[in-house]
């Protein structure tokens, strides 16, 4: 079958003909008797509690247009539940719980090993000094003032080492990494080998021979403490100072909306670079808002849903293979013709949205300014003479909030921020602004200009777990061209590393006496 005969067997309808066709179907459906199968759809009335977001989850997904009446009941038609659990979901949830328990066990196991190693390090010098007095006290030679000075030196060095180890190692963990920190593990192995070697030498040369020179034993313990201090200095260089000099420029891009940030990092492994990026992400990136992404998806789905294919020749007159191929080509051609005019629709939709945002922003500013005029901070001398209607900041916020609630609610819905702010959080912020004597503009700044992710409640941004996806080992260092992903439930961060180039600078000396100038006059110039 050729192409022309294939296209002649189909008709493509859109626009007014499609609307009339749907209207005829709806009118016929109204006259049909209601089937018993329709009982699976139920009408449910949902009362929004005051502490919940201004709109339900459906507004976040952008699937339905919500009513602008805040606090009133909302009717929703529900069918088959979208949150039903299958056997695979139960297995996945069980696996996640096991993984979380494994992470906790690993963290406590690492902490236990660190505590045991620390006790071994600090008790070893003291054991070196005490064991001769316990095993052969009668054979020891008195050393007098020299040993007393060494005792004071050991005591202060151990105190300094204790504070230094506490400041460097015993800090609250910022995150749970998938692999062990290589440098910290190497330092722990080095300290363990060092202490074991000292114990072996002490057992062979001092314990077996029962050395009588107690001053030499004390100096041996002092040398151990000095070596431990030098190892701690090495730990500071490897764990803290090595990564301070910037060596790489990383580009972090969120895959849903394309928001991008640039950071400079030092010599870090992939997993520690991912940790540094996540710490900066919560402070620099705006809150991920899926509602802003639903408009383009719904627009594309609407354009594709507007195309229908009808077989006017009947199903028996076409070959199956040629039918599917020609139908797909026809759909693509029709979609291309409609895409040529879709930019006008996008332009007018954006212009209408901007107009609505400006209009509701103006209403919100006026409503908040009028609400703030109804409260006044009382001075101390006025509080003594004031009647009994004096309110604290919480009561004042609850008193003026209803006058601005509707305007604020409409603005948040228009800008797709309704899921980020609950009524309780707005009232708490209003009470804080009243207490701090802030202006209406300061109160509105959190809603007119959305801030970083940390500004909002943890329930809206806190991911339970991030997944690091990398082609190279996560314990290897960063290199030029390294690419890895940080995935959470709703989106991913794509990270690309580029090495900062080597900069070659040269010097050029200019003699200050060489700055001599002359005035050039032309014949046409009048002086």
Image (cartoon, grey):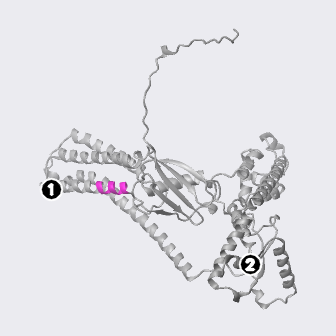
Q: Nearer the viewer, mark 1 or mark 2?
A: 2
Q: Is residue 188 magenta?
A: yes
In the rendered structure, which disc, 1 or 2, sits on the residue that comes first in sequence?
2
Q: Secondary structure at mark 2?
A: helix
Tell me where residue 495 appears, x and y as whole percent. Answer: 51, 56
Q: Which residues are magenta?
A: 182-190
Quarter assignment of residue 461: bottom right
Q: Residues within 10 Å of mark 2 (few under 14, many from 20)?
A: few
Residue 488 seen in this snapshot: yes
Query: Which numbered tag is attached to residue 204?
Result: 1
Residue placed under numbered mark 2 in the picture: 8
**Magenta: predominant secondary structure element?**
helix
Pointer 1 with pointer 2, Cβ within 8 A: no
Quarter containing the N terminus: bottom right
Tell me where residue 144 appears, x and y as whole percent. Answer: 20, 40
Task: Please give the name of the residue rendered at 52% of the width and 48% of the height, measured from the top-left corner.
Answer: 263
- Toward the viewer: 502 or 195? 502
430 over 151 or under it: above or below: below
Quarter containing the C terminus: top right
Task: Please give the name of the residue rendered at 51% of the width and 73% of the height, measured from the top-left corner.
Answer: 97
Q: Secondary structure at mark 1?
A: helix
Q: Is residue 83 left or right of residue 181?
A: right
């Amino acid at each position: 079958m050729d192409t022309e005969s294939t296209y002649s067997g189909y008709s493509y309808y859109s626009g007014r003909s499609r609307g009339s066709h749907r209207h005829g179907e709806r009118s016929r459906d109204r006259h049909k008797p209601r089937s018993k199968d329709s009982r699976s759809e139920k009408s449910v009335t949902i009362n929004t509690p005051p502490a919940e977001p201004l709109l339900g989850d459906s507004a976040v997904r952008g699937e339905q247009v919500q009513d602008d009446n805040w606090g009133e009941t909302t009717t929703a038609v529900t069918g088959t539940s979208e949150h039903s659990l299958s056997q695979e979901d139960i297995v996945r949830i069980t696996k996640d719980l096991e993984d979380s328990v494994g992470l906790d066990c690993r963290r406590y196991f690492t902490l236990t090993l660190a505590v045991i190693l620390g006790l071994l390090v600090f008790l070893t010098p003291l054991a070196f000094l005490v064991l001769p007095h316990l095993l052969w006290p009668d054979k020891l030679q008195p050393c007098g003032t020299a040993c007393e000075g060494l005792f004071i030196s050991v005591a202060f060095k151990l105190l300094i080492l204790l504070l230094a180890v506490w400041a460097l190692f015993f800090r609250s963990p910022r995150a749970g990494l998938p692999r062990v920190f290589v440098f910290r593990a190497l330092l722990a192995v080095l300290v363990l080998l060092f202490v074991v070697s000292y114990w072996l030498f002490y057992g062979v040369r001092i314990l077996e021979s029962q050395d009588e020179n107690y001053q030499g034993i004390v100096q041996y313990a002092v040398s151990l403490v000095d070596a431990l201090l030098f190892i701690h200095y090495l730990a500071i260089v490897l764990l803290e100072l090595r990564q301070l000099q910037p060596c790489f420029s990383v580009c972090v891009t969120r895959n849903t909306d394309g928001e991008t940030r640039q950071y400079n990092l030092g010599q870090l492994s992939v997993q520690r670079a991912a940790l540094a990026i996540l710490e900066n992400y919560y402070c620099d990136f705006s809150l991920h808002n899926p509602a802003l992404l639903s408009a383009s998806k719904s627009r594309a789905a609407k354009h594709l849903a507007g195309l229908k294919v009808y077989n006017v020749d009947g199903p028996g007159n076409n070959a199956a293979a040629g039918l599917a191929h020609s139908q797909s080509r026809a759909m693509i051609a029709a979609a291309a013709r409609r895409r040529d005019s879709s930019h006008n629709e996008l332009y007018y939709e954006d212009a209408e949205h901007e107009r609505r945002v400006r209009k509701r922003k103006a209403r919100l500013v006026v409503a908040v300014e009028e609400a703030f005029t109804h409260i006044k901070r009382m001075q101390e001398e006025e509080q003594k003479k004031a009647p009994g209607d004096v309110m604290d900041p919480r009561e004042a916020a609850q008193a003026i909030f209803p006058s601005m609630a509707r305007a604020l609610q409409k603005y948040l819905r228009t800008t797709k921020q309704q899921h980020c702010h609950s009524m309780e959080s707005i009232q708490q912020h209003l009470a804080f602004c009243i207490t701090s004597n802030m202006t209406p503009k300061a109160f509105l700044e959190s809603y007119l200009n959305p801030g970083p992710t940390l500004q909002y409640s943890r329930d809206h941004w806190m991911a339970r777990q991030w997944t690091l996806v990398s082609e190279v080992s996560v314990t290897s260092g960063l290199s030029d061209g390294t690419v890895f992903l940080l995935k959470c439930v709703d989106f991913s961060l794509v990270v690309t590393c580029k090495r900062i180039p080597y900069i070659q600078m040269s010097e050029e000396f200019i003699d200050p006496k060489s700055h001599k100038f002359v005035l050039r006059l032309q014949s046409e110039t009048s002086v």
